[in-house]
Amino acid sequence: MTPAGSGTWAKVKPWVLPLIALLVVAGAAWGAYRWTQTQYYVGSDGIDVAIYQGIPQDLPFIQLETLIEDTGIPVATLEPYQQQRIEDTIRAGSLEEAREIVESLTVDIPEPTPEPTPEPTSSPSASASTAAPSPEASASGRDG
């Protein structure tokens, strides 16, 4: 005689191990995704320096990064080595650390030098009126 319920266990047993494995894989995937969302990095949004939450990789149908701040600093204004660092992305442990990285980039941006203003010059008509009288005017004045 077989114990009561052993037929049910025989039917369920092949599904238990795959179901447990699926739950473990799903839990690990969720944990990995949650971990990526605790990461930050400084990169480019195509034009400006930007701060992202996540990691700079994507999986099919899953975006692992979110734009947090667009700094408004054009990547083109940075030194070439800094531009390369931004294109490669700079990891940060927190949002505050990412902001400090951006701040360090802006410290190195050279201030634009103001254009020198030209000194005013006198116009040709003004200098003609203050010039000495022409010889013809002097001669006509003597005929008198």
Image: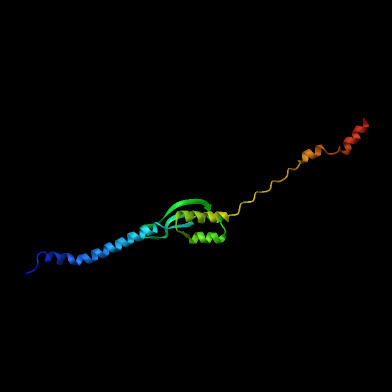
Count the marks: how many?
A: 0
For this orientation, the residue located farthest to the left is 1
Image location (x, y in percent) of residue 52: 44, 55
Side of 9 relative to 90 (left or right):
left
Which residue is more in the foreground, 10 or 47? 10
Q: Position of residue 33 (x, y in %)?
A: 36, 59
Q: Position of residue 11 (x, y in %)?
A: 15, 65
Q: Residue furthest bottom?
A: 1
Q: Is residue 47 visible?
A: no
Q: How is the image coloured?
A: rainbow
Quadrant hosting residue 24: bottom left
Q: Residue at x 77, y 41 (%)?
A: 124
User: Does the rendering let one see residue 83?
Assistant: yes
Residue situated furthest right in the rendering = 143
Q: Quadrant of the N terminus?
A: bottom left
Choose between 142 and 6: the one closer to the eye: 6
Q: Is residue 101 left or right of residue 20?
A: right
Question: What's the residue at 51%, 55% (across, down)?
Answer: 102
Q: Position of residue 18 (x, y in %)?
A: 24, 66
Check the picture and name the quadrant holding the C terminus: top right
Left or right: 11, with 134 as reference point: left
Q: Tell me which residue sits at (93%, 32%) in the image.
A: 143
Residue at position x 44%, y 53% in the image: 67
